[in-house]
Image: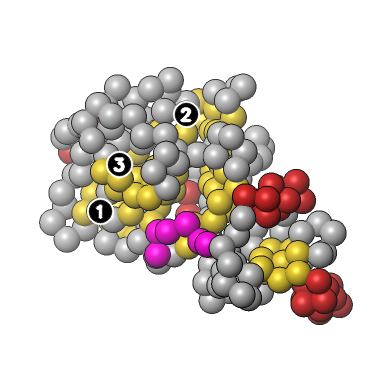
């Protein structure tokens, strides 16, 4: 499987499988019920496949079928293991799957936790809950990654590794009622212009953190529709 073009990584709890790009025809991988230890030593002779260097790291697969990383500058085999993993992207983040959950890691090898909603240390014999779905970054000047919790709450991660906050032009923070409304309307991925448009076209989120409603939203929707911009839905 070529992990350079992953659009989304999803865990199917019913089938106990990871889905690449949410499409069984693209690739499915059985999930370990629990990786016994996310940190372990691997000798070079136990590595069965090594990828090319990408942003300072090489992705490898060990003899047990688990994924890990090698630092390019000193060829250190890092001890972290995952069911699946991708190369690091230009933002210093990589998609990983482990123990029936999916998430992002950064180059400090901290993992984005759904409990803490921030990057936390991967510790020996510890279980860190990730997410049910994680989408690659999409947008324009400030791309966002759509992530879905096991409670079906939708969040967006920015390239700084933080949850994107959305507010109206009066700078009020998004309320719980608004979140419920957006969930009912269906939160998708941001399009290449940096907008996520609700199904009815009455509400638009921008990747820079603003919420547009009423005429402002309709103007954006009309402009994008007339220009035949495709709005991707998750």
Residue 60 inside the magenta-drawn segment: no
Q: In the rendered picture of this protein, how many numbered marks are placed on residues?
A: 3
Tell me whether the residue at label 3 lies in contact with that at label 1, contact meaning CB atoms closer than 8 angstroms.
no
Answer left or right for 228 relative to 211. Answer: right
Q: Earlier in the sequence, mark 3 or mark 2?
A: 3
Instruction: Name the residue located 82 percent from the left edge and 76 percent from the top edge.
Output: 215
Q: Residues within 10 Å of mark 1 (few under 14, many from 20)?
A: few
Which range of residues does the magenta coloring cover? 160-165
- Picture quarter containing residue 209? bottom right
Residue underneath mark 1: 108
SS class of the residue under badge 3? strand
Left or right of 179? Residue 108 is left
Secondary structure mostly seen in the magenta stretch: loop
Q: Which residue is mark 2?
A: 100
Q: Is residue 195 above or below residue 119?
A: below
Is the residue under label 2 in contact with that under label 1 (CB below 8 Å)? no
């Amino acid at each position: 499987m070529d992990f350079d073009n992953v659009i989304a990584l999803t865990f199917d709890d019913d089938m106990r499988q990871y889905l690449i790009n949410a499409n069984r025809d693209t690739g499915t991988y059985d999930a370990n019920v629990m990786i016994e230890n996310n940190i372990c030593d691997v000798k070079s002779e136990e590595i069965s496949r090594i990828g090319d260097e990408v942003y300072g790291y090489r992705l490898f697969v060990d003899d047990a079928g688990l994924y890990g990383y090698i630092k390019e500058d000193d060829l250190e085999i890092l001890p972290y293991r995952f069911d699946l993993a991708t190369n690091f992207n230009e933002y210093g983040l990589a998609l990983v799957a482990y123990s029936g959950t999916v998430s992002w890691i950064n180059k400090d090898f901290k993992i984005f936790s759904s409990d803490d909603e921030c990057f936390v240390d991967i510790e020996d014999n510890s279980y860190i809950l990730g997410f049910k779905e994680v989408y690659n970054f999409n947008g324009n000047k400030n791309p966002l990654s759509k992530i879905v919790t096991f409670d079906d709450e939708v969040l967006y991660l920015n390239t700084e590794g933080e949850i994107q906050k959305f507010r109206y032009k009066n700078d009020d923070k998004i309320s719980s009622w608004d979140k419920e409304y957006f969930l009912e309307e269906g939160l998708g991925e941001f399009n290449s212009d940096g907008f996520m448009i609700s199904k009815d076209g009455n509400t638009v989120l921008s990747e820079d953190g603003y919420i547009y409603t009423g005429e402002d939203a309709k103007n954006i929707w009309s402009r994008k529709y007339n220009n035949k911009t495709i709005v991707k839905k998750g």
